Amino acid sequence: MTKKTLLFLVIVFLSLYHLLGQTSKEKLLNSSYQEHYVEFETTNRIEIQDIANKFSIDNLVYLPEKKCYKITVWLHQRDFANFTALEIPFEILYAEQNDAKVSMANSIDELMDGWTRYPTYLTYEALMSYFQNTYPALCKIDTILPATPKGRKILSAHISTTLDGSVPKPKFFYSSTMHGDEAGGYYMMLRLIHYILSNQEDSKVNAILNSVDLWITPLENPDGVYYSGDNTLGTSPVSSRANANGYDLNRNYPKAFTPIGSSYQPEVTAMMNFMNLHQFTMSANLHDGSELFNYVWDLYTTKEMKHPDSDWWENIGRAFADSCHFFAPNYFTDRDNGITSGGNWYVIINSRQDYANYHARCREVTLEVSRRKVPNNNELNTYWNNIKTSLLNYILAIHPGISGIVTDSLTGKPLQARIFINNHDQAHQRSDIYSQLPHGDYYRPLLPKTYSVTYSAKGYYSKTDTVTVFPYKSTIRDVKLLRNEIYNSDNEIIIYPNPVNNQLKIIVSDTWKNATVTLFSITGKQIEQFIICETESYIDVTAYPNALYFIHFSKQGQEKVFKIVVQK
């Protein structure tokens, strides 16, 4: 052995000795990685909440044998110093402790040959194009974000028999992998798109295609997934939880119960715009690291603020978990046998789930679909087979409840109206919904029960109905609202006297000669209709009961409405 070799070995030994002798604090502060997961134990729930307010908690598990909580926290480089300053004893979780055994598909054929691989980024883009090109009548690929900070795309597959939106249908949205080192959901969403498009004879698939407008976004954070390059993915640090700018996207959405700000990560801004554009009735975002159905609120425990639809969440969540248990009894059993309210698990701020429910008025849940963040290749088909039926059933859970179309009782034009369930909805939680234009359609998932429902729109009389919801189907309730505004411009139309007891005189300018005049009751029933040929005319109201009436003038697309009172 030469002196040079001996000196090299001594240096290596001393370096390793120094490294092994470092504390977890020193290792974290000296780390060259962009991010780390750390783990510690505590019995103090207040300490847990303090951590959640400052950093991203990844998981929390209660250890009954120790009577304490085990907390996993994700830290970006910018967090290392602040976290160590808390002087909490912790351990660093290194990649080799949970490294996944993955292989990549470099083509669509390789990916579909048994579905036992993950796609490279280019294969992913090619696959999304393949779906659209192979099934053009059923699938259209939308671009949510044309270029992430690293120049990749966020894509969504729109799936329906009516891609043009000509038929009103409830809208459902699946999305996955806003944390780039959680790839199980990414794989499952690609499988789901393929299964739905290639199994149209399946009864559930057929029902989805014909009765739901479905969007599926398999990959919300492509820069995080392909952090090490387009041809590989894995657990952190191969893939990154954060986006390219180093932010946890699930802590970057507008906080519930507060106004929307002006500065968010590009992936978040694009997703917010997409959700607001489509006004989804229901949605779910997929994560990995646990196995459970997580519903609102993330910001509060159920003791602090229980959502009005908590019973509904628990009902459909139990159905989701039980379906998983049917295929694999030990799958989807975390927390309360597969179900939890977010805040009851651990409280977080600025989550996508809370944004969707509060700001977008969309009933969204978080699905944790595999304990291993990146399932091994030989596990992928097992996970898919265990959850496939639940994913399909959950889309169809959009139907049971109340649905219909809200229109103007005089013109038949669709309205954007508020639908409020009395003695149920909470305005401050924004659990009420609105009908959507251009069709005026609305969809309100509810448990079987009889409800009092109030429909209202600006400029219209509100209407309250009693509606009974039955299991497994939607109760259709179309509603016509009556205007309560009077429109009179430049005295082009004059109606008097008002109130009237016998003859109602109508004077119109030349502009409104030959207009169609229709008299309606307050319930929207047509009383009489005629064309006004002269500048002056009369309506005899002596036979009409004392009540409020509406006179509607229509000519070449222009409309005016007046209200009169018959009083004798």
Image: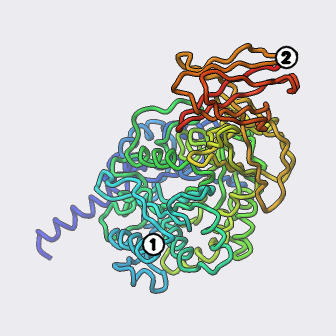
Which sits earlier in the primary sequence, circle 1 or circle 2?
A: 1
Front position in the image: 566 or 239 = 566
Judged left or right of residue 316, residue 29 is left
Q: Amino acid at mark 1?
A: Pro
Residue found 56% across the figure and 68% down from its top: 161
Q: Amino acid at mark 2?
A: Gln
In the picture, which quadrant includes the N terminus?
Answer: bottom left
Residue found 39% across the figure and 84% down from its top: 109
- Count neighbours of disc 1 (C-alpha within 10 A) and say few if under 14, some if 14 to 19, many if 20 or more: few
Q: Is residue 386 above or below residue 414?
A: below
Residue found 49% across the figure and 41% down from its top: 253
Judged left or right of residue 471, residue 265 is left
Per the image, label 1 sits on a secondary structure element best described as loop
| Residue at the limit of the structure toward the bottom, as seen here | 113
Question: Which residue bears the numbered disc 2?
Answer: 567
Dividing the picture into quadrants, the one containing residue 141 is bottom left
Per the image, label 2 sits on a secondary structure element best described as loop
Q: What colouring style does the render use?
A: rainbow
Front position in the image: 437 or 394 = 437
Judged left or right of residue 199, residue 319 is right
| Residue at the limit of the structure toward the front, as seen here | 534
Q: Position of residue 370 (x, y in %)?
A: 58, 66
Do we see residue 304 in this rendering? no
Question: Which residue bears the numbered disc 1?
Answer: 136
Q: Is residue 312 above or below residue 101?
A: above
In the picture, which quadrant includes the C terminus?
Answer: top right
Dividing the picture into quadrants, the one containing residue 428 is top right
Front position in the image: 57 or 115 = 115
Q: Is residue 299 above or below residue 115?
A: above
Q: CA distance from mark 1 to mark 2?
A: 62 Å
